[in-house]
Amino acid sequence: MLSTLLAFLGACTLIAASPGPSTVLIIKNSLRSRRSGFMTVLGNETGVFVWGVVAAFGLTALLAASQLAYDVMRIVGAVVLVVFGVQTLWAARRRKGEQGQAEGWEAPERSAWASYRGGLLLNLANPKAAIFAMSFLPQIVPAGAPELPAMIALAAIWAVFEVGYYGVYVWGVGRMKAFLSRARVRRRLEQVSGGVLVALGARLALES
């Protein structure tokens, strides 16, 4: 069981380290404040746990088997990514007009619920997260273990592990806040993160 758990945590590390829309959103919101970043992490990991539970009950198999269901989720996920990206780009453009080249600008605080909701929505709108949970978790269940409770427990461990992993991102952004809060630097970061989110959304919409 210990060797299985260690292998599972190693796989979780590789999954979390792979760049994706959740990572971009967590870093973007961490620029506002550590609270905003951490609540985004909690929302994202709630989505991870939900998909793990859904996979445990076998419901994600329906998504994998139905091209129509997958396509609907894919388009919804693409729209969510593009909307988040456009909002970020628009905020950077508006800030340029309002703040000029002012230094030391502080981002307006988002409510904890808004940050949590953004992380949760982005994860739940990603069909790849659902398919990955279905294909990943069953392989980790130890032989002879009851599958349903084991998969739910693994989903919880996965979510808690990623809270700690992405918490390091939030902490790191917070440590560099004095530099990252400069108006010019922040605009560039928002332009990059917004462009990445739009590109990821377009890629998700166009893929077969």
Image (cartoon, grey):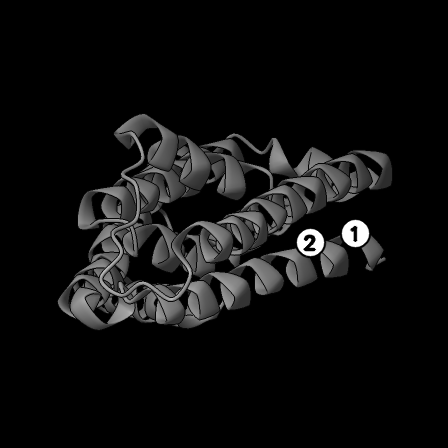
Q: Is residue 115 above or below residue 184?
A: above
> Residue 177: image x %, image y %?
20, 64
> Residue 37: image x %, image y %?
28, 49
> Residue 84: image x %, image y %?
56, 45
Q: Nearer the viewer, residue 188 or 85?
A: 188
Label 1 Cα neighbours within 10 Å, binned few <14 / some 14-19 / many ≥20: many
Q: Is residue 118 above or below residue 3?
A: above
**Which labelled disc corresponds to residue 205?**
1
Under circle 1, the secondary element is helix
In what quadrant of the picture does the N terminus appear?
bottom left
In what quadrant of the picture does the C terminus appear?
bottom right
For label 2, the residue is 201
Q: Nearer the viewer, residue 88 or 146?
A: 88
Under circle 2, the secondary element is helix
Q: Is residue 155 visible?
A: yes
Which amino acid type is marked by label 2? Answer: Gly
**Left or right: where does residue 63 sit relative to residue 128?**
right
> Residue 139: image x %, image y %?
48, 58
Q: Is residue 145 visible?
A: no
Q: Is residue 31 above or below residue 60?
A: below
Total numbered badges shown on the rendered structure: 2
Query: CB under 8 Å between callouts 1 and 2?
Result: yes
Q: Is residue 123 above or below residue 102?
A: above
Which amino acid type is marked by label 1? Answer: Ala
Taking the spot 62% from the left edge, 52% from the top edge, the residue there is 128
**Left or right: where does residue 9 sit relative to residue 137?**
left
Residue 120 found in image quarter: top left
